[in-house]
Every structure is written in C-alpha cells, then in structure tokens.
C-alpha cells in the first residue's frame, strides 16, 4: 500500500452543523500525526477545478462553534461522470494528495465509493447530514442540532396554534428518512408525525383523522417530512381543507433554518471524535469506510453498507406519539 503523506479534506452535499468541528478535528489530528493537510473547496467541484489550499492548524481556529462549512459545499454533476472523476484524480496527483476525508451525506459517500474503487485511493467518510439517514451509525453530524432547531421553532408555533385553536402542518426535512419528523414530534409533544418510511403502506392522514385526533384538543400540530408522495405539509393541508372544511388549517415549512446555526454540544463532540477517528482509520490502512457511532463506540462502516438507504426507524415511537396525543 502506498504511504500516505498528504490528506485532503472536503465537505459535499447539503451543509450540516458540526461540519466545521469535523474539519478542525481531521486537520489537527492529521497534523499531530505528521501528515500534511489540504483543504478542497466546494466539494468534488473544487477537486475538479483544482480549488485546493494548504491547511495549517490555524486555518481551523475558532470554527468549532460555527455552523455551515468553511470549505464551502457544492453539488457536482461533473463528478458523476468518469471524465469528471479523471480530472479530479489528476488534480489530486498534481497537489500530492494521497488520501481523502469526505464529509457528507449518502450521495457524497456514494461518489467517494466509486472514486476510491476507480483509482484505488484511500478514502474515509464522515456522516455529515442533518437527515440521519446513513446506515451503520446511530446518529450523523448535524442531526442533533437540526432536531433542536425544529423543537425551538415548533414550540413557538405551538403558542399560535393554541391561541387560535388551529391545526398546523409543519414540514421538516428528511425526504427519505423520517427521523427529524418522528423525533421532532416526540420532543414537541406533537399530535402526529407523517414519515416517508410508511407512506406507501398506510394513508397516515386518513388514519389520523379516523382516530379523531382533534376531538379533545384545542390545537394540533402534525410534523410532516417533506415528500413528493404525500405532497408534504402543503399537500396534506389541501386534502384536509377539502375533506374537513371545519378545521382551521395552517402550514409552516421550516426549510433551511434547519441546516444552520451553531452546532449543539452533542454534534461538536460527535464531529470531533469522528474527525480524529478518520485519521486513525487511515493510519490503520482502512479503506472505503465511513466512521459511525454505535452505542457510543466508534465503528468502521463499509461505504456499501452506509449508503444502502434503508436505515431502520424505530416504529414503536410512532405508537408513542399516538398514545401520548390523547
Ligand atoms: P445530503 O444528504 O445533505 O443531501 P448528499 O451527500 O447526499 O447530502 P448529494 O447532492 O446527493 O448530497 O451528493 C453530493 C455530491 O456527491 C453530488 O453532487 C455528486 O458530486 C456526488 N455524487 C452523488 N452521487 C454520486 C454518484 N452516483 N456518482 C458519483 N458522484 C456522486
């Protein structure tokens, strides 16, 4: 195996709070262990265009508390082509980068897996996404902060919902995974969560209304994961307005507020532990793995497993929401 001297870091896909803490940990752990570090700007896009800068310890000073990513992030259609990845590889060679740490979601790790296989490059991934949808890790960097942001926002909406005796559909992120919607519902005492995992199995809205979820309440909050299938909060609200015109329905789409903000203590700690672990993984000749956390233990999860797109959600929690909404 080729000796690693220089490690490149990039952030890719949607930004998530804690990515900076991860960049800091990767950079400092790498320098501590004698590697040189290069920051790759704008994800795979910057690897293709050669936007690469040397990183010293002071490049990552004072960022642990900042949301977003100092390396910027982008989506790159070019990296999805063999020609684009060849350009990326050529730039890596030109810059003397021997290994990569990729921080991002399932798309970013899918790209990392293909790139690593094509060019036999050591790559370690960190799960950076608010959606918590990567398999093999209990949680992802940014998820806890996003959940707390949702909780604060919904608490505020609850005041209006109660005062006006309204039914609110609040849309949160998580197109393919209902972790934010379900745990957000638990944390805010919402009356229901509508999640993609069961969207094709049951008509969750019809079930909700049949259960008479508003009978004893003067306000109701339903957390809805964004979804093309259900139409998200707007789609569900339209249905309710048509079928149950007696309800005073409102919609709030939380949108990008969920991605921003200073990372929570949990996310900073997780990102820091995972960032250091990425360097240890490279030192141990690990290849094509994502760092995960399982029962507070750091684990190596092969990319193929991490991106398989069917991380199980705890369905008992749906019942918990139902039981507690009486
Ligand atoms: P989030 O979960 O926040 O959306 P993500 O990492 O899943 O983040 P994507 O937009 O899906 O975000 O992927 C980021 C980038 O990863 C893409 O723009 C592309 O450059 C690369 N990528 C994704 N899928 C592939 C693929 N199949 N082959 C090569 N590159 C890919």
Image: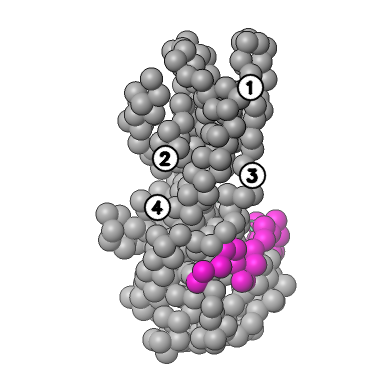
Res 249 label: 1
Q: Which mark is residue 139?
A: 4
Q: Is mark 1 within 8 Å of ligand 1?
A: no
Mark closer to the observer (3, 2): 2
User: Where residue 187 is drawn, which disc sits there?
Assistant: 2
Q: CA distance from mark 2 to mark 1?
A: 22 Å
Give how far across and how far down residue 249 sits, in percent. 63, 22
Closer to the camera in the image, 252 or 304: 252
Which comes before the other along the chain, label 1 or label 3?
Answer: 1
Which region shows up in magenta?
64-86
Whether residues under marks 2 and 4 lie with C-beta atoms below 8 angstroms apart, the answer is no
Is the residue 207 above or below the residue 228 in the image?
A: above
Q: Is residue 200 above or below residue 148?
A: above
Q: Position of 301 compared to 116: left or right?
A: left
Specify whether residue 300 is painted magenta.
Answer: no
Q: Residues within 10 Å of mark 3 (few under 14, many from 20)?
A: few
């Amino acid at each position: 195996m080729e000796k690693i001297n220089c490690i490149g870091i990039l952030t890719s896909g949607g930004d998530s709070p804690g990515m900076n803490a991860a960049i800091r940990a990767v950079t400092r752990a790498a320098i501590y262990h004698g590697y040189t570090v290069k920051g790759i700007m704008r994800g795979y896009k910057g690897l293709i265009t050669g936007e690469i800068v040397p990183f010293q310890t002071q490049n990552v000073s004072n960022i642990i508390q900042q949301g977003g990513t100092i390396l910027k992030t982008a989506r790159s259609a070019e990296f999805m082509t063999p020609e684009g990845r060849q350009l990326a590889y050529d730039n890596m060679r030109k810059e003397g980068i021997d290994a990569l740490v990729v921080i991002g979601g399932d798309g970013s790790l899918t790209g990392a897996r293909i790139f690593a296989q094509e060019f036999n490059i050591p790559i370690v991934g960190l799960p950076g996404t608010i959606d918590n949808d990567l398999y093999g890790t209990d949680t992802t960097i940014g998820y806890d902060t996003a959940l707390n942001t949702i909780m604060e926002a919904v608490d505020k909406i609850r005041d209006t919902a109660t005062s006006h005796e309204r039914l609110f559909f609040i849309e949160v992120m998580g197109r393919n995974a209902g972790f934010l919607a379900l745990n957000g519902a638990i944390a805010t005492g919402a009356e229901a969560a509508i999640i993609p995992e069961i969207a094709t199995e049951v008509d969750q809205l019809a079930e909700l209304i049949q259960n008479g979820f508003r009978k004893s309440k003067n306000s109701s909050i339903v957390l809805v994961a964004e979804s093309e299938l259900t139409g998200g909060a707007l789609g569900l609200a339209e249905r309710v307005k048509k079928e149950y015109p007696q309800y005073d329905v409102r919609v709030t789409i939380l949108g990008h507020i969920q991605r921003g903000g200073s990372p929570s203590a949990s996310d900073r700690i997780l990102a820091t532990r995972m960032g250091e672990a990425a360097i240890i993984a490279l030192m141990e000749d690990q290849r094509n793995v994502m760092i995960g956390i399982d029962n507070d233990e750091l684990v190596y999860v092969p990319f193929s497993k991490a991106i398989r797109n069917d991380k199980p959600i705890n369905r008992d929690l749906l019942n918990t929401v139902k039981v507690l909404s009486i």
